[in-house]
Amino acid sequence: MNRVWTHNPLVRAVLWASAAWYALVMVAPEWLLGVTAGEGPTEHVEHAVLLLAVLTWASVGGGLAQRRRVIPGIAALMMVLQLALLLMEETDFGAVYNAPGLADPFQVILNGNRNLRQALHALAPAMKSALDASLLSWLVVFFGLPVLRLGSRLEPAVATAPEAAAAATLAVTLLLAATLCWYHFMPTWFQLQLYALVLVAGVRANRDLLRA
C-alpha cells in the first residue's frame, strides 16, 4: 500500500504542482490572481480538460456497452453526464465563447439566465446546493470506492488506488490552503487538477478496455 504513495507519479505531480502554486502565492500573488481569475487563462485550460474528459469517458461508456457490462457502463454514463453538465455550466452554455446558438435557448429555458447555478439559486437556493452535492457525491464515490476496496463491480469505471491517492493528496493541499487563509487563490487551480485526474482516469480506463 505504501508504494501507492511513494512510487506514484500522480501523487508526485500533484505535490510538484501544489509546491509551484504555493511559491507563486508567496512571490507573485497579484499575477496568480489574474491568471486564475474567472474566465482567465487557467479557466480556459480547465474547460479544455473538461471537454477532453467528457469525450474520454463517453468512449469508456461506449466500450463497456459493447462488452455488455451494464453496471460499470452506467457508472461511466453518470460520469459523462456530470462532466457535461459541469462543462456547459462553466461556459454558460456557450455564452463564454460567443455561441448564441447554444446560449440563447438555455437563456429562455433558464428564465433569462445562462448559468444553471444562478437559475437554480433564483428558483430555490437548496436546488443549487443539490447540484453541487450531486457532483461532489459522485466524485467521492469515484475516488473513494478503491480506498474501501468496494469498486470491483464498477471497474474500470472507477478510480484505481494510485488515482485515489492523488485525489486525497490534492484534497490535503486544499485543506492546507484553507488553513493558511489562501483559499481565494485556490478554487480554479484545484478544479483544474481535479478534472485532470478524472481525465487521466478515463484514459487509463480506455487503455484497460483495449487490453481486456
Image (cartoon, rainbow, N blue to C red):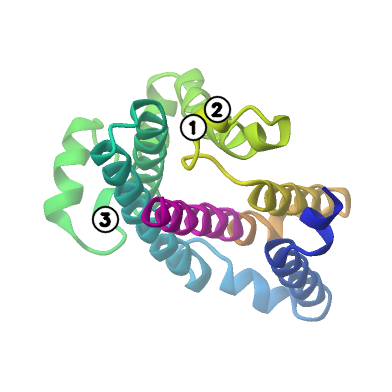
Which residue carries the number 3 mark? 95
Q: Which residue is mark 1?
A: 154
Residue 199 vs residue 180, the one in the foreground:
199
Q: Magenta stretch: residue 206 in it? A: yes
Nearer mark to the viewer, of 1 and 3: 1
For image coordinates 70% across by 75% down, the residue present is 30
Q: Is residue 136 left or right of residue 49?
A: right
Q: Which residue is mark 2?
A: 133
Tell me the quarter of the picture where residue 9 sits: bottom right
Q: Amino acid at mark 2?
A: Ala
Image coords of residue 198 (percent x, y): 52, 52
Q: Using the image, determine if residue 194 lies above or below residue 62.
A: below
Secondary structure beneath label 1: helix
Residue 84 position within the rendered picture, expressed as x and y whole percent measured from the top left: 34, 45
Q: Main secondary structure of the magenta part?
A: helix
> Which residue is depicted at the point 44% across and 27% down?
121
- Residue 69 position in % (x across, y down): 34, 31
Mark 2 and mark 3: Cα distance apart in space: 25 Å
Bounds of the magenta span?
191-212
Label 2 to label 1: alpha-carbon separation: 21 Å
| Vertical side of 2 occupied by 27: above or below | below
Q: In the image, what residue type sits under mark 3? A: Ala
Location of residue 53 in the rendering, given as x and y in whole percent from the top left corner: 40, 55
Tag nearer the camera, 2 or 3: 2
Mark 2 vs mark 1: give the one in front. 1
Please state the total of marks drawn on the protein image.
3
Q: Is residue 152 left or right of residue 109?
A: right
